[in-house]
Each structure stands twice: as structure tokens, then as C-alpha cells.
Amino acid sequence: MEFGGGSPCGGARPADVILNTFSYHLTPAAFIFEGGAEAIGCPVIPSGPGNTADQLVAIAQYRPRVYVGVPDFLKILLDKADEAGADRSSLEIGMVTGAALPESLRAELAARGVAVSQCYGTADLGIVAFEDGGAGMVVSENIILEIVRPGTGEPVPDGEVGEILVTRLDPDYPLVRFATGDLSAILTGATTTGRTNRRIKGWMGRADQATKVKGMFVRPEQVAAIARAVPEALRLRLEVSRDGEQDRMRLLAEHPDPAAAQALGDRLADKLAEITRLKGAVEVVAAGSLPNDGKVIADLR
């Protein structure tokens, strides 16, 4: 199968019949995968989602080797086929996206004869990265991918979680530093698959962390503004919680020098109140002690 950048993956071969269960109505996923299938000469059953009984008839009649869709619907098809005694033995490969693929579900599908791999993409960009048997997901070759701190657009070091930004220099539909709103991290180290492009860990959550505190929105861009105003702080993380029946904010700031904690905390508290129009506590913590989860604002309520 060809994903976006023309890189074959997933195990599909020319002439394999593909069951495409993504919707062909107002969403591009079905057409993205069908375009890749056509590029390597795979006939496609444009089945779309639902209609399980009809899907089982199509599987038995046309014997697709490859399933394309969300992982949960693949399990539904296998369950229904086994309940009805329908022949689904042709299905050997699953290419999935659009929903979580827990390792427990991947293992169950493999035990039932379907080897599943997943990819990550968006409606605007197509396929951004995909599994190829190595660690994480390899980035498609037709894009430039960056990981940035949410709310800033500033690249983070490799291995640190941040928002995925993608540049695609396509003459028909160019996108420059398109913010996906999704979190991931660059994987470092060698891989055994032979591919040389960069890798990401996969989808790790959403970067949109705006929340309301006492009726007012607090956004990652405001935390970034505090960081620019007090550059001595290495990393910031704003935690929002409840104390009794009141919203409370606590700004955590990394700094390597405990002796500077009091003065730094006072400056940060002033900037927090100035920029968000809300008061909050400040705690200076050791450098490197904040979680590497990409969160600038953690809503704990």
C-alpha cells in the first residue's frame, strides 16, 4: 500500500482486493486510501461503514485480503462473521486509523488471522506517518514535520512531546507549518527496517489545552507569553484544580537554582496575574522534573 509519500507499507501487494470501510461522504479518508490503492494496482470495494450483513456478503464474494478502516469496525466484522459462520478467511491485513488501537486489540486481531498496522493523518494533509514494522511511525517522505511547544510554534528537542506541525510543498494545495492540534514526539535511535526518514511516537493526544478558570479562558499562548517575559524559567506547566468550590491555578516552573526560587516565583506570579487576569500560586521545581507529556495546561478538575 502507498501512503502519501509513495512509500509502500502495510503488506498490500498489487492485485490485492481492498475492503475500504471509510465513509465516501463529506470526508476524505476513503479517497486518500483509494488513491494509494490505485497507485499500486489494487482493486477496491468502496463499502463504507456499517451495513455489516452486506459487508460479510461482499467479503465472501470478492475475498478482499486487506481491510481499511477504523480498528473497532474490523473487530465487529470478525465477530459477526464468526457468529454467522460466514467466510472471512481472505482477510489477512488491516490498515487502520481514525481511532485508538490498544495493544490488546492488535493482539486479538492478530490471533484471529489479521495483522494490523496503523497510520496517522489528517483531512488536510493526508497520511503523515505510518507503521512499517519498526519503532513508532515513519514520517511520509513528501512532508516536513516539526514538533513544537503548544501555543508557541517553537521546536522542542527530540524526544520531548509537543504539537505536530507539517509543511507540504504541494503545488496544488501547499501548506506551510500547518498546526494539526495533535501531540507526538520525535523518536531517536536507529531502526531495523532500513528506512531513513524521521519517526514519531504516534498520536499522543490533543494540543488544544485551553480551559476556563473562574469563567475566563486560559490558553497555552498565555503561558508562552509568561515564559517569554521570564526567560529564566526553563519550562512552565499551569495546573488547574478545585479547592472546595473554587477554581485554583498553580504555575509550576523548572529552574536549576533553588536559591533563586523565591525571586523567580514572585516574578512569575506577577506575570501570571497580568497576562491571565487571574491570580495563582507558583511553585519552582527542579529542572527536568515536569512530565514529558506535551501539556502546557493540565486541567485536573
Image: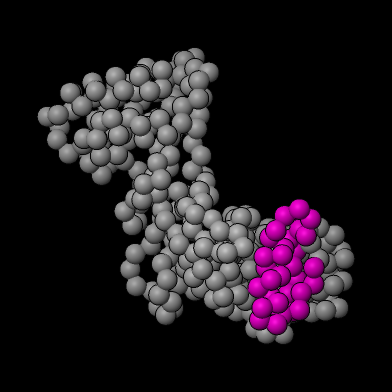
Corner quadrant of residue 48: bottom right
Q: Is residue 151 or residue 250 the one in the foreground?
A: 151
Q: Is residue 213 or residue 112 the one in the foreground?
A: 213
Q: Is residue 6 magenta?
A: no
Q: Position of residue 134 (x, y in %)?
A: 45, 72
Q: Is residue 248 above or below residue 56?
A: above
Q: Residue at x 36, y 50 (%)?
A: 155
Q: Position of residue 173 (x, y in %)?
A: 60, 59
Corner quadrant of residue 272: top left
Q: Residue at x 40, y 49 (%)?
A: 148
Q: Is residue 183 or residue 118 the one in the foreground?
A: 183
Q: Residue at x 31, y 34 (%)?
A: 227
Q: Residue at x 28, y 30 (%)?
A: 229
Q: Is residue 45 magenta?
A: yes
Q: Is residue 196 above or below residue 170?
A: below
* Count of numbered labels shown in the rendering: 0
- Say left or right for 68 vs 296: right
Q: Is residue 145 above or below residue 5?
A: above
Q: Position of residue 23 (x, y in %)?
A: 76, 58
Residue furthest to the top: 245
Image quadrant where one finds the N terminus? bottom right
Q: Position of residue 93 (x, y in %)?
A: 65, 74
The answer to whether one can see residue 110 in this image is no
- Give, as a single range, the part of the protein colored magenta: 17-46
